[in-house]
């Protein structure tokens, strides 16, 4: 038995050494974090797992509640769908007022929840702010103006901010979440995000075709960070969190070097996510201030010719009877904007097997829209 145990120990050590030397040492960090701090997979409750930068608010301005607040009973179909997909929150804002609000799984209106890839859309919002501020000339500015190494690359010298936002960068990157050796898994736990991003090469000319790649968002964040010459969290606070009177400070997870995980991981409340949706639905105007240029917001919400379901890291659905735009994050995080109804829907959850259509849009978004657009009428009958 001792010989067997010794052989197992040697074998385990050899495997561990091979994993580490192959560049997958982050797996040990992931295992240690998950064993110590909760869920064994990425979760909307990962706020304490990683270092983060604060996104301060200034003067909290809570949503005004509609006279019909929480007076409607959600349909059985929606309730079953939310239960099946392990929803943690559902919030509806109609005509600028809070109409419906429910929480599950020990969450409430003060819970900070992980945005996952909704942060990619928030990056595009900040690019608009940076253009308005003169830090970036336009979305067509070359990334090589900030990172000269791309000027030496046959494909990289053509890469622009817009290519990164529309997922047309042409990187040698396969978006994969299902196994621990994927680049996405490494990205979530790696200690140096810039090193990983700059190490990814190109396989085709930027602008050639759409392919969703989280490394594009990380490079976008790095470029934006350099352009504005400050941390992304500080810029998000200055341009969005404080002017909108967010109810709570947010947090933006970082790597070990203090660089924000630009591809994901802004931790905020459902109510504050809804304010962001309301701002973009109003083409960048909040009360009497134009916080982001109206023209940029329209461009940001316009689908690309390569993919009519995707804009500037915001998703689009103009095929449904009720047209919408939405921010979309892993495990079913949504900020859904429905201009013709003047409605914003926020839903968060824990489910990673949502059914999607042929354009990779989650079917749950349409289900929520079609059902929740009726609750105001039901409440007033």
Image (cartoon, rainbow, N blue to C red):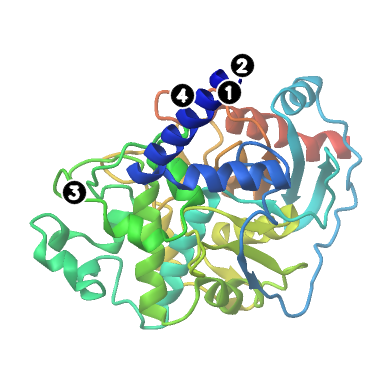
> Which of the marked residues, 2 or 3, is nearer the chain's N terminus?
2
Q: Which residue is mark 1?
A: 5
Q: CA distance from mark 2 to mark 3?
A: 52 Å
Q: Which residue is mark 4?
A: 357
Decide: marks 4, 1 in contact (CB < 8 A)?
A: no
Q: Please say if 352 is above or below 113.
A: above
Decide: marks 2, 1 in contact (CB < 8 A)?
A: yes
Please tell me whether mark 3 or mark 1 is closer to you in this view: 1
Q: Report x, y in % for residue 338.
A: 59, 45
Q: CA distance from mark 2 to mark 4?
A: 54 Å
Quarter that holds the C terminus: top right
> Seen in the image, is 103 located left or right of residue 112?
right
Please tell me whether mark 3 or mark 4 is closer to you in this view: 3
Q: For this rendering, which residue is in front, 243 or 265?
A: 265
> Which of the marked residues, 2 or 4, is nearer the chain's N terminus?
2
**Could you classify mark 3 by the number of other residues whose Cα lies within 10 Å: few (under 14), some (14-19), or many (20 or more)?**
some
């Amino acid at each position: 038995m001792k010989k067997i145990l010794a052989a197992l120990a040697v074998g385990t050590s050899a495997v561990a050494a091979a994993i580490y030397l192959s560049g997958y040492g982050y797996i040990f960090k992931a295992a240690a974090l998950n064993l110590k701090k909760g869920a064994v997979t990425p979760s909307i409750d990962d706020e304490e797992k990683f270092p983060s930068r604060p996104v301060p608010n200034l003067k909290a301005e809570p949503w005004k509640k509609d006279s019909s607040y929480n007076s409607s009973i959600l349909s059985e179909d929606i309730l079953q769908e939310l239960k099946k997909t392990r929803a943690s929150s559902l919030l509806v804002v109609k005509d600028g007022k809070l109409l419906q609000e429910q929480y599950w799984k020990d969450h409430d209106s003060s819970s900070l929840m992980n945005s996952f890839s909704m942060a990619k859309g928030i990056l595009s919002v900040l690019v608009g702010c940076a253009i308005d501020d003169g830090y970036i000339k336009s979305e067509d500015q070359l990334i090589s103006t900030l990172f000269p190494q791309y000027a030496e690359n046959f494909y990289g010298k053509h890469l622009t901010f817009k290519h990164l936002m529309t997922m047309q960068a042409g990187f040698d990157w396969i978006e994969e979440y299902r196994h621990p050796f994927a680049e996405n898994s490494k990205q979530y736990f790696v200690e140096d995000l810039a090193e990983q991003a700059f190490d990814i090469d190109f396989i085709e000319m930027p602008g050639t075709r759409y392919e969703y790649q989280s490394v594009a968002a990380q490079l976008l964040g790095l470029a934006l960070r350099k352009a504005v010459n400050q941390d992304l969290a500080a810029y998000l606070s200055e341009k969005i969190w404080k002017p909108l009177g967010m109810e709570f400070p947010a947090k933006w997870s970082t790597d070990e070097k203090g660089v924000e995980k630009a591809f994901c991981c802004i931790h905020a409340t459902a109510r504050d996510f809804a304010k962001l949706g309301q701002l973009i639905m109003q083409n960048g105007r909040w009360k009497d201030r134009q916080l982001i240029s109206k023209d940029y917001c329209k461009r940001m919400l316009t689908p690309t010719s390569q993919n009519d379901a995707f804009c500037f890291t915001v998703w689009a659905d103009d095929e449904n009877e009720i047209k919408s735009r939405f921010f979309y994050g892993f495990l079913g995080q949504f900020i859904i904007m429905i201009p013709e109804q003047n409605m914003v829907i926020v839903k968060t959850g824990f489910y990673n097997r949502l059914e999607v259509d042929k354009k990779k849009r989650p079917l749950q978004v349409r289900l929520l829209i079609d059902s929740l657009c009726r609750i105001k009428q039901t409440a007033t009958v």
